[in-house]
Image (cartoon, rainbow, N blue to C red):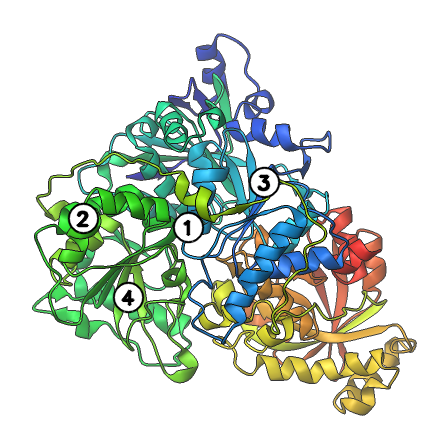
């Protein structure tokens, strides 16, 4: 089904995989070098077109367009304003698909929307009102373009199927683009995703995506690399099918994606009235890839990602055949994911030997596409979901899609069966809508199924869980009144309805400045919209207290700063920080604030030892070896340890909340994504790496770590620093910094990106 090559390979004429360079040269009829062949990837050519550094090993990328949603754009614009923003230099689209319900926190969600509208007018942007489209569907319909690059402040910014290399990053990276700066990275590796065969009837894009995620996530095969989709199987897939696979590539931890394009993608642009944006993309006649994932589409069956990660994949047939064993395995993994905070079991979902689920949802950037919903309507037509616990909701990804589904009768077929059809909204994906009942089990065609991401709260003793599936099998399960059913088990005639895009829907509602700024517009600030607090520059020496210690194999950004109801506070840095690590380590905020008292005392010209008594013996021990430490040259703050933090969302708040609570660093064995590490750096936090085994660390929660001459180490571009765990003695440890650009080092020296741009 899915095969990973253990080394780099050559692709000849886009169809033949060759592992040996001599064979590649022989078949090409000329001498082939790996270096030259690597330049024949589609990714290389697009990156070269957008790189202004003159050095393809050290890229400085200028993007064509930017996009954000209403959880992220307030903080981004506030940061850019504090750094000197005058107008948006490139098209910047502000969508409203996360906090669009305005159901939590009084007026603050709609206040954020009004902030976005007035900023679009003042700085020359585009504003998409709530319920019009989820961020990524609008980008596909209106922003994508062959050979273009788009940067978005959402991790699922993936438009590779349309020939657009897109990347999801934390807000500070968008700030850099708004201030005419660059996105600086090393040239990423490029891994080929070779699609062969053709999906069987009833198999959808989520099935293919989950198969790929299951094969590549745990081993990091495509981590921070570009996935390049090639092979004869690409041509067998519709544009919608490709888009559905593409958006899920984020869950492999890749950097970006790009696909070969053809007449089906050309037709997509024509349907949306943007034929000029199509560009044919293909790899060169001899192309070298750093790895290759071979996918036989014909062998893929309906898949399910069981809680609590998109990589925890099985075929639905496997689950149904081995119910008790699979559910037991999920429960064992839950002991790690949930830290034993609640009793979690799915055994009561087995009824007469079948798995009963409580909820089905098709939604958002992954599930809400036209073809997915049409297929679901074909499956459920003439059937009904029943009147028991099972519920079924469908969220079209945009109003134009919704309108076409109304016109072609799909909505009527769904609603007659008992389905609730709602507006374009991302809430079910991150816990702001359709939260299941306690102990309920939901199946969703959405992007993630992390612990509590569906909205339940461990701290309140609640637990619900989500499995990811394709829309087709969700509809088959709904037609079977909640009993888990693969779509391949249903005898269905798929109508293959044709899509017609109504451009007037956006033309009549979306504010588009056409890039013209109006400085006279006054920005509307709601009472929850706050400026970032002042952040100190890096000091000569640092004293860090470990205030949280996380030993999970992977820590998601949802665990660092929860999604769901906290989203309403993302415009208020201090208000949001109160939720930091609240699901993973509820004592974190109190511990961090206690340490922060010392830093605030220093800022106020007071002695930190007078406000934090526990510092006295710590400083006494340090001063035995470093007598000058603490005399106007010491910063005091907090740090956390996690084995592998930062999987999942691009949200910068996973780092900024730590920063506003006095955080100065993270210590990890590795960082799950480039996004999270970049967020740490942009908020002036040191991304330390320790090579010590996480079960045998030299330090523990509550310990102080002294890092002498850290400022000098950053200035001199050191790759590692000596630090000391302060106890009865100073115990030396080594902390690595990894590769950092000159700009990143300067940002850390200044204390954060805002300070860096203020000068």
Along the polypeptide, which appears first: circle 2 or circle 3? Answer: 3
Tag 4–tag 2 contact (CB < 8 Å): no
Horizontally, residue 52 falls left or right of residue 73, namely right
For marks 2 and 3, give the CA distance.
35 Å
Q: Nearer the viewer, residue 421 or 3?
A: 421
Q: Secondary structure at mark 2?
A: helix
Q: Nearer the viewer, residue 502 or 428?
A: 502
Q: Secondary structure at mark 4?
A: helix
- Image mark for residue 65: 3
Residue pointed to by mark 1: 133
Q: Nearer the viewer, residue 343 or 329?
A: 343
Tag 2–tag 3 contact (CB < 8 Å): no
Pinpoint residue 660: horizontal percent, then vertical percent. 68, 72
Q: Secondary structure at mark 3?
A: strand
For marks 2 and 1, give the CA distance.
21 Å
Residue pointed to by mark 2: 377
Horizontally, residue 638 falls left or right of residue 624, namely left
Along the polypeptide, which appears first: circle 1 or circle 3? Answer: 3
Quarter residue 606 falls in:
bottom right
Quarter residue 57 falls in:
top right
Mark 4, Cα crowd under 10 Å, few <14 / some 14-19 / many 20+, is: few
Along the polypeptide, which appears first: circle 4 or circle 1? Answer: 1
* Residue at the image position 47 percent from the left and 39 percent from the top: 142
Pinpoint residue 211: horizontal percent, then vertical percent. 32, 46
For marks 1 and 3, give the CA distance.
18 Å
- Image mark for residue 329: 4
């Amino acid at each position: 089904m899915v095969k990973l090559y253990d080394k780099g390979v050559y692709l000849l004429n886009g169809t033949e995989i060759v592992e040996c360079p001599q064979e590649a040269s022989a078949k090409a009829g000329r001498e082939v070098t790996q270096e030259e062949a690597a330049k024949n990837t589609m990714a290389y050519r697009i990156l070269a077109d957008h790189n202004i550094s003159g050095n393809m090993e050290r890229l400085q990328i200028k993007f064509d367009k930017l996009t954000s949603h209403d959880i992220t754009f307030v903080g981004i614009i506030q940061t850019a304003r504090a750094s000197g923003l005058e107008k948006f230099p490139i098209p910047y689209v502000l969508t409203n698909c996360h906090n669009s319900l305005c159901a939590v926190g009084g007026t603050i969600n709609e206040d954020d929307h009004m902030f976005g509208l007035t900023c679009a007018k003042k700085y020359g942007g585009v504003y998409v009102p709530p319920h019009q489209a989820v961020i990524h569907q609008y980008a596909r319909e209106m922003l994508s373009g062959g050979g273009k690059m788009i940067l978005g402040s959402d991790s699922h910014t993936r438009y590779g199927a349309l020939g657009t290399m897109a990347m999801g990053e934390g807000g500070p990276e968008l700030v850099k683009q708004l201030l005419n700066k660059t996105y600086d990275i090393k040239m990423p590796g490029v891994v080929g995703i070779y699609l062969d065969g053709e999906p069987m009837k009833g198999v959808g894009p989520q099935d293919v995506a989950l198969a790929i995620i299951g094969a590549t996530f745990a081993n990091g095969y495509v981590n921070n690399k570009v996935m390049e989709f090639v092979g004869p199987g690409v041509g067998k897939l519709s544009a919608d099918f490709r888009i559905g696979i593409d958006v899920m590539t984020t869950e492999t931890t890749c950097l970006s994606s790009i696909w070969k394009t053809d007449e089906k993608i050309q037709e997509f642009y024509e349907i949306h009235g943007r034929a000029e944006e199509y560009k044919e993309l293909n790899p060169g006649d001899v192309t070298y890839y750093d790895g290759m994932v071979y996918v036989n589409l014909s062998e893929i069956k309906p898949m399910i990602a069981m809680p609590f990660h998109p990589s925890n994949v099985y075929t639905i047939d496997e689950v149904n055949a081995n119910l008790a064993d699979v559910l037991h395995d999920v429960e064992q993994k839950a002991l790690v994911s949930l830290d034993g905070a609640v009793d979690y079991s799915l055994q009561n979902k087995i009824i007469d030997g079948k798995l009963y689920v409580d909820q089905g949802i098709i939604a958002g950037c992954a599930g809400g596409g036209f073809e997915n919903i049409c297929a679901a309507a074909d499956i459920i037509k003439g059937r009904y979901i029943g009147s028991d616990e099972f519920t079924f909701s469908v969220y079209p990804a945009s109003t134009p899609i919704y309108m076409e589904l109304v016109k072609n009768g799909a909505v009527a077929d769904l609603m007659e069966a008992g389905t609730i059809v709602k507006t374009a909204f991302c809430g079910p994906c991150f816990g702001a809508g359709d939260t299941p009942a306690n102990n309920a089990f939901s199946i969703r065609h959405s992007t993630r199924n992390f612990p509590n991401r569906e909205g339940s709260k461990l701290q309140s003793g609640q637990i619900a869980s989500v499995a990811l599936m394709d829309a087709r099998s969700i509809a088959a399960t709904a037609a079977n009144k909640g009993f888990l059913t693969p779509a391949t088990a249903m005898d269905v005639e798929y109508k293959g309805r044709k899509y017609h895009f109504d451009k007037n829907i956006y033309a009549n509602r979306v504010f588009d400045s056409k890039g013209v700024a109006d400085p006279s517009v006054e920005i509307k600030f709601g009472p929850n919209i706050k400026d970032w607090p002042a952040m100190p520059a890096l000091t000569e020496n640092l004293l860090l207290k470990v205030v949280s210690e996380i030993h999970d194999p992977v820590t998601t950004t949802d665990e660092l700063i929860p999604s769901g109801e906290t989203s309403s506070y993302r415009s208020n840095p201090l208000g949001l920080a109160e939720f930091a690590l609240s699901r993973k380590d509820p004592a974190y905020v109190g511990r961090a604030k206690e340490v922060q008292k010392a830093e605030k005392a220093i800022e106020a010209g007071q002695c930190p030892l007078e406000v934090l008594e526990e510092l006295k013996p710590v400083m006494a021990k340090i001063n035995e070896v470093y007598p000058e430490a603490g005399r106007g040259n010491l910063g005091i703050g907090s740090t956390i340890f996690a084995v592998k933090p930062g999987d999942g969302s691009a949200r910068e708040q996973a780092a900024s909340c730590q920063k506003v609570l006095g955080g100065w660093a993270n210590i990890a064995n590795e960082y799950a994504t480039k996004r999270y590490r970049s967020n740490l750096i942009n908020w002036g936090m040191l991304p330390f790496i320790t090579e010590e085994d996480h079960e045998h660390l030299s330090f523990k929660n509550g310990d102080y770590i002294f890092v002498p001459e850290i400022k000098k180490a950053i200035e001199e571009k050191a790759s590692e620093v000596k630090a000391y765990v302060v106890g009865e003695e100073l115990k030396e440890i080594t902390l690595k910094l990894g590769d950092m650009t000159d700009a990143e080092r300067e940002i850390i020296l200044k204390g954060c990106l805002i300070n860096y741009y203020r000068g």
